[in-house]
Amino acid sequence: MNKLDTNNHSVFLLTYHLLICVKYRRKAIDDQIAARIQEIGEYVGNNYHITFLEYNHDRDHIHILFKAHPNTEISKYINAFKSASSRLIKKEFPHVRKMLWKETFWSPSYCLLTTGGAPLETLQKYIESQGKE
């Protein structure tokens, strides 16, 4: 079982799977750029109580498994991460600009999924059974 996180008033385990694609699925990510994207994501994540658990990439997208605190504004983190990484990648790897459309690195959309241990049916049955002997 995963170790639970705590703060002053709660115990929690909030994990997410984030998928972000390069605009128009351009194949702009190599291992060096991917490593820099990870560094930026972890650095920005410190300000939002985000901890990377796993990170990987393909040529046109990245996957991040991360945990967060209940008060984390995840959409604000994602926007800050996408903005900072886009700006820094284009600055530090100028050859990437040739692959992009209007210099936009990331697609405006993303996929964010919660991860959990128990299937919904199991949780529903557990809640239904509360108060019964």
Image (cartoon, helix red, strand yellow):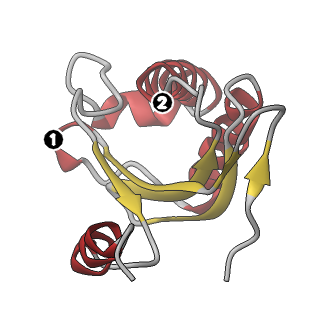
What residue lies at 76% left-to-right and 70% top-to-bottom? 3
Q: The residue tagged with tag 1: helix, strand or loop?
A: helix
Nearer to us: label 1 or label 2:
2
Residue 84 lies in quadrant: top right
Say which quadrant the N terminus sits in. bottom right
What residue lies at 44% left-to-right and 69% top-to-bottom? 116
Q: Position of residue 5 (x, y in %)?
A: 76, 53
Left or right of 41, for residue 24:
left
Q: Nearer the viewer, residue 47 or 61?
A: 47
**Residue hosting label 1:** 24
Q: The residue tagged with tag 2: helix, strand or loop?
A: helix
Q: Residue extending furthest left?
A: 24
What residue lies at 47% left-to-right and 18% top-to-bottom? 76
Up/down of 127 relative to 68, above or below: below
Up/down of 125 relative to 106, above or below: below
Q: Position of residue 13 (x, y in %)?
A: 62, 57
The crowding category of the residue bearing disc 1, from other C-alpha atoms within 10 Å (few below 14, some 14 to 19, many at least 20), is some
**Residue hosting label 2:** 74
Q: Residue extending furthest right?
A: 8
Left or right of 111, for residue 35:
right
Q: Amino acid at mark 1?
A: Tyr
Q: Position of residue 98 (x, y in %)?
A: 33, 31
Q: Position of residue 73 (x, y in %)?
A: 51, 23
The crowding category of the residue bearing disc 2, from other C-alpha atoms within 10 Å (few below 14, some 14 to 19, many at least 20), is some
Up/down of 48 relative to 115, above or below: above
In space, the residues marked 1 and 2 are separated at their CA atoms by 24 Å
